[in-house]
Amino acid sequence: VFNTNLIGTFNILKKCINDKANIIFLSSSRVYSIEKLRAMVKNLNIRTPLKIGKKITEKFETESAISLYGFTKLASEKLIKEFFFKQNLKYIINRFAVIAGPWQFGKQDQGFIPLWVARHLYKKSLSFIGFGGHGNQIRDVIHIKDVCEIIYLQIKNLRKVNNNIFNIGGGSSNAISLRDLTYKCQRLTKNKIKIKRVKNTSIYDVPYFVTDNSKVFKFYKWKPSINIDNILYDIYKWLKENKSLKEYF
């Protein structure tokens, strides 16, 4: 993550200065405080399903521990501001939530949406990891097409809207727990698979994250257009049309 996220950003920024180029940077929701996000859930063992409540704005705390991955993203953001200070160049920083869609080869800790669909389709096992192993932790999900749409709008409007940070995600309408994701995958694939329970929780994991899209809507009148069911169906269709992908999941 240091070589790709931080040193990679450093190299890109040197080229931006050399070429007098603007930048739109894809950051992450992982820049926010693990402790503060955990504090939003009273019982971290989460025996009962969580309710979708408070959404995370750009003002949420970033000062305390955020994971090494999150640090490299946040450090990259600060690097952009330093490089572009007093430069006649423009930047936008997008803190994306969970991105999903066809051609994403997911794992348990990254890209879990296609992993969930694929494991159900191919009848392979999965695990609810952490927070008691109940599968009640929540994330909001955005389709890659919606990601491309907002970036295109930002490119078109970069002269008017720049030097700003935006939280961008699926929002409350596209927020889902692992347990509910499992039910949806069962209905979609007509398969029921074994789900293991791993109670131990990584120190870097958080039980809840739902994006507040208010700021990005205010500036661009944009909101996600593809709902969670269609996100899952797009991935399912991609997997069905490319049967050789089974070995990657």
Image: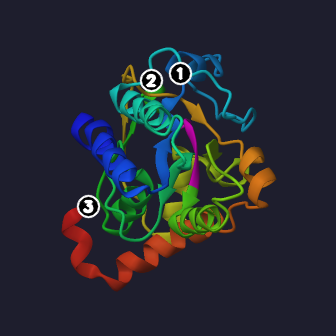
Q: Which residues are magenta?
A: 136-141
> Viewer-nearest of labels 3 and 1?
1
Q: Amino acid at mark 2?
A: Ile
Q: Hey, which residue is sitting farthest left in the picture?
A: 247
Sequence-wise, which precedes: disc 2 or disc 3? 2
* Residue 210, x across and y down, in percent: 64, 40
Taking depth in this image into account, of 88 and 124 the one nearest to the observer is 88
Q: Quadrant of residue 133?
A: top left
- Label 2, label 1: how many angstroms apart (C-alpha)? 5 Å
- The dominant secondary structure in magenta is strand
Q: Amino acid at mark 1?
A: Ser
* Residue 207, x across and y down, in percent: 54, 29
Do the numbered discs 2 and 1 sit on residues whose CB atoms are within 8 Å?
Answer: yes
Q: Which residue is mark 2?
A: 66
> Viewer-nearest of labels 2 and 3?
2
Q: Quadrant of residue 21?
A: bottom left
* SS type, badge 2: loop
Give the crowd class for mark 3: few <14, some 14-19, many >=20 residues within 10 Å.
some
Q: Hey, which residue is sitting farthest bottom in the picture?
A: 241
Q: Which residue is mark 1?
A: 33
Taking depth in this image into account, of 191 and 170 the one nearest to the observer is 170
* SS type, badge 1: loop
* Residue 132, x across and y down, in percent: 46, 25
Return the mark for residue 249. Answer: 3
Q: Amino acid at mark 3?
A: Phe
